[in-house]
């Protein structure tokens, strides 16, 4: 009996490396089809295995794109940010909306075929940094797969939308969420999670596409150092952390980018920031790189076994996720054809790595003004960090560029093999970082270890106007071989939509101001524009049916910039009008007139409170409440603007909402585990102060 137990114990580590899964599908959407998409279809998030977002369709091209018109549109029933890329197979268009809902439309007529609602509890919103968004589904065999905001992976029947299986993928009670699109390969569905601001431990997991049973799970950060680690790769990683880091989760979540390359037979994925952001609270015994956060990691798809990693931002302290889209291609480097991974992460440097080994080939800035690093080591690619950027060591606030929104965030880039250029949505959004010497771990909301109050704007119209003018974006065409920007289209605001490149010498992109545009791929000349009435975050896609090419994009303003930055630092914010819009040549469709905008006047109670209360309220609001209700209490388009709250006049009602969770069904959960009543009252007094300041400036 003892020998049997020993034998079983010896097999347990192997079980974690890869369990037997069902055979890949041979009917419906197969691995071969995803690798080589049938003409006119769009079967996976990034179009193909390489995640190029380049379509060979060229019926719509730089000569006739001006004839593009609205073929059909579909209004959505979720008034939050829309970030999904539609997929098209066999004449059906599949999308997700906010709150992880799934819809299937006739791709030619727009007729709704079926709809699925996973019924995500609205109180889950407190565990999501950047709105109740979802980036899309995966198609495989005869199923549709979606990851839900509350951490489930759901398989639906493609024809009916009926649930086939429903599996919880995150730990029970976890603050994790799923916002990314699943990927499928070799009979498995791959998905990670979001939540590296909430004491979570990142991973990428694989589930049997037929049954939903877990095949393997790869953890991106170590666990308790006193216990055996979940894989040899973590034995090495644990040496790059110190103190009781594991009690705070570690971060490193895999919330977006997952790419499988059949050529190397590797899965590449990006990891998020370290948690907490401030290294003083996760490397208490000295500096450490905090592996494998802010990295690209390569694993074997069959087992989840570690192959290589490249850390783009060691000891990340600025929220420089590496979750942005990973694209694989062949490039001529120094006269030799090399299989490479291309990546434009938040930190502002465009990385080219060897796809087989992860060896550094090149790294060059794709935006101007980077100041957290002086450059990259030309041999290793390791950043040369500016000492002033190490705010926890200097004790001084650091105005960093890029900021946490990133030089490039999740909005997908595209790569055209015809031009050799990568088309990147970029942001110009500096941010103030400062060490918080009084920080203590909490239980609700962000847990960062920083004090962001130094970045608050005074009630000064000139300062605010200058800040709004400085917050911009651009569409950048980057040459990965030359390591230079080929052309740039300046944009009024940051966080514009993802891009699509086509063989018609076109690049499509939506803007935060609600314009859907087409540019020449070789020069960046604007050729066509359509006003969609609401900001566009999602990336477009294209497909063809019966000899006609269509271009589709989801419209609906929201996301991180709206909920956290609000309208205080943005030149203009569009309302949320969520819909799917589809275009083709010669179409004459029109959108319905947008609803009238209602302006509200500030009418707060008179200011009160001691200087100590107001300072405390500002700090608590800035580091917790602003994540949803906007910088300096000025909200964006989606979440309530607290300066207008009826509860400002009613301290008891304010406590019932904030302390007790009176409105938890709307996403406003109880904060009693984070703040005591006196702290909650201080927040109310600060919001009243801010409302009166803005009223004095004539703001609304």
Image (tube, rainbow, N blue to C red):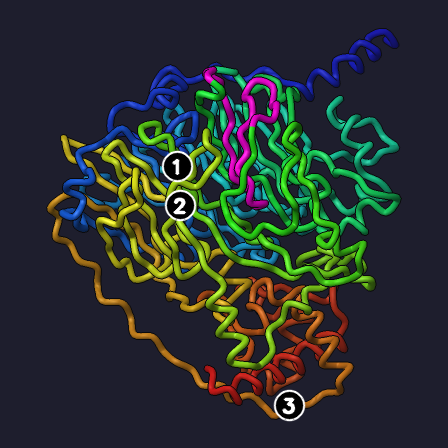
**How many C-alpha atoms fall within 10 Å of the one at disc 2: few (<14), some, or many (≥20)?**
many
Position of 114 compared to 679: left or right? left
| Quarter of image, res 310 | top right
Q: Secondary structure at mark 1?
A: strand
Q: Number of marks in the image?
A: 3
Which one is closest to the eye, mark 3 or mark 2?
2
Q: Secondary structure at mark 3?
A: loop
Please report the bounds of the magenta region as a residue range.
Answer: 335-361
Q: Is residue 264 above or below residue 61?
A: above
Q: Position of residue 182 (x, y in %)?
A: 48, 34
Give the alpha-carbon distance from disc 2 to disc 1, as whole Å.
Answer: 8 Å
Q: Nearer the viewer, residue 529 or 349?
A: 349
Q: Residue at x 42, y 33 (%)?
A: 138
Residue at image mark 2 = 498
Q: On residue 576, which mark appears?
A: none
Residue at image mark 3 = 607
Pick whichever of labels 3 and 1 is earlier in the sequence: 1
Q: Residue at x 78, y 81 (%)?
A: 612
Residue at image mark 1 = 414
Position of 176 compared to 224: left or right? left
User: Circles 2 and 1: CB distance less than 8 Å?
Assistant: yes
Give the alpha-carbon distance from disc 3 to disc 1, as whole Å.
Answer: 51 Å
């Amino acid at each position: 009996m003892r020998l049997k137990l020993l034998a079983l114990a010896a097999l347990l580590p192997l079980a974690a490396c890869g369990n037997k899964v069902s055979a890949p599908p041979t009917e419906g959407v197969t691995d071969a089809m995803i690798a080589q998409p049938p003409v006119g279809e769009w079967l996976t998030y990034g179009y193909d295995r390489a995640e190029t977002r380049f379509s060979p369709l060229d019926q719509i091209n730089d000569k006739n794109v001006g004839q593009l018109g609205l073929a059909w549109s579909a209004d959505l029933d979720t008034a939050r940010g829309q970030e999904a890329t539609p997929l098209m197979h066999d004449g059906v268009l599949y999308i997700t909306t906010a709150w992880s809902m799934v819809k299937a439309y006739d791709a030619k007529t727009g007729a709704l075929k079926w709809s699925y609602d996973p019924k995500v509890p609205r109180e889950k919103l407190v565990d999501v940094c950047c709105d109740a968004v979802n980036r899309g589904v995966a198609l495989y065999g005869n199923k549709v797969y979606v990851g839900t905001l509350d951490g489930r992976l759901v398989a639906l029947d493609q024809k009916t939308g009926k649930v086939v299986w429903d599996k919880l993928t995150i730990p029970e009670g976890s603050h994790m969420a799923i916002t990314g699109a699943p990927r499928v390969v070799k009979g498995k569905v791959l998905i990670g999670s979001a939540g590296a601001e909430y004491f979570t431990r990142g991973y990428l997991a694989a589930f049997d596409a037929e049954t939903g049973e877990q095949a393997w799970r790869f953890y991106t950060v170590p666990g308790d150092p006193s216990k055996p680690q979940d894989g040899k790769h973590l034995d090495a990683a644990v040496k790059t952390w110190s103190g009781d880091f594991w009690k705070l989760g570690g971060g490193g979540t895999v919330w977006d980018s997952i790419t499988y390359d059949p050529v190397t037979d590797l899965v590449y994925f990006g990891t998020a920031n370290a948690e907490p952001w401030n290294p003083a609270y996760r490397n208490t015994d000295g500096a450490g790189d905090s592996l494998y956060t802010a990295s690209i990691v390569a694993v074997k798809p069959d087992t989840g076994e570690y192959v290589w990693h490249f850390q783009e931002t060691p000891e990340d302290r600025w929220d420089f996720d590496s979750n942005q889209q990973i694209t694989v291609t062949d490039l001529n480097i120094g006269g030799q054809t090399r299989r490479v991974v291309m990546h434009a992460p938040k930190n502002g440097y465009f990385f080219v790595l060897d796809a087989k080994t992860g060896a550094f080939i090149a790294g060059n800035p794709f935006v101007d003004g980077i100041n957290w690093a002086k450059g990259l080591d030309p041999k290793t690619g390791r950043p040369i960090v500016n000492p002033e950027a190490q705010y926890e060591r200097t004790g001084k606030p650091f105005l960093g560029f890029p900021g946490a929104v990133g030089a490039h965030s999740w909005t997908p880039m595209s790569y055209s093999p015809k031009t050799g250029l990568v088309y990147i949505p970029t942001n110009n959004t500096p941010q103030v970082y400062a060490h918080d010497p009084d920080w203590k771990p909490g239980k609700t909301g962000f847990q960062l270890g920083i004090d962001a109050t130094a970045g608050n704007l005074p009630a000064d119209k000139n300062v605010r106007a200058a800040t709004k003018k400085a917050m911009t974006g651009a569409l950048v065409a980057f040459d990965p071989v030359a390591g230079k920007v080929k052309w740039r289209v300046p944009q009024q605001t940051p966080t514009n939509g993802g891009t699509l490149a086509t063989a018609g010498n076109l690049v499509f992109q939506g803007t935060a101001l609600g314009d859907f545009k087409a540019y020449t791929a070789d020069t960046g000349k604007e050729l066509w524009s359509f006003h969609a009435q609401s900001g566009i975050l999602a990336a477009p896609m294209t497909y063809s049916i019966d000899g006609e090419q269509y271009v589709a994009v989801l419209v609906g303003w929201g996301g991180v910039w709206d909920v956290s930055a609000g309208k205080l630092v943005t030149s203009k914010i569009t309302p949320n009008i969520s819909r799917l819009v589809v275009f083709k040549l010669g179409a004459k469709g029109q959108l319905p007139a947008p609803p009238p905008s209602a302006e509200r006047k500030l009418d707060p109670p008179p200011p009160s409170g001691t200087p100590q209360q107001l300072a405390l309220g500002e700090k608590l609001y800035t580091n917790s409440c602003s994540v949803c209700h906007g910088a300096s209490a000025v909200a964006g388009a989606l979440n309530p603007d607290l300066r207008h709250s009826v509860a400002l006049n009613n301290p008891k009602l304010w406590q019932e909402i904030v302390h007790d969770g009176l409105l938890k069904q709307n996403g406003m959960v109880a904060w009693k585990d984070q703040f005591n009543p006196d702290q909650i009252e201080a927040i109310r007094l600060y919001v009243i102060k801010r409302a009166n300041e803005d009223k004095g400036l004539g703001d609304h």
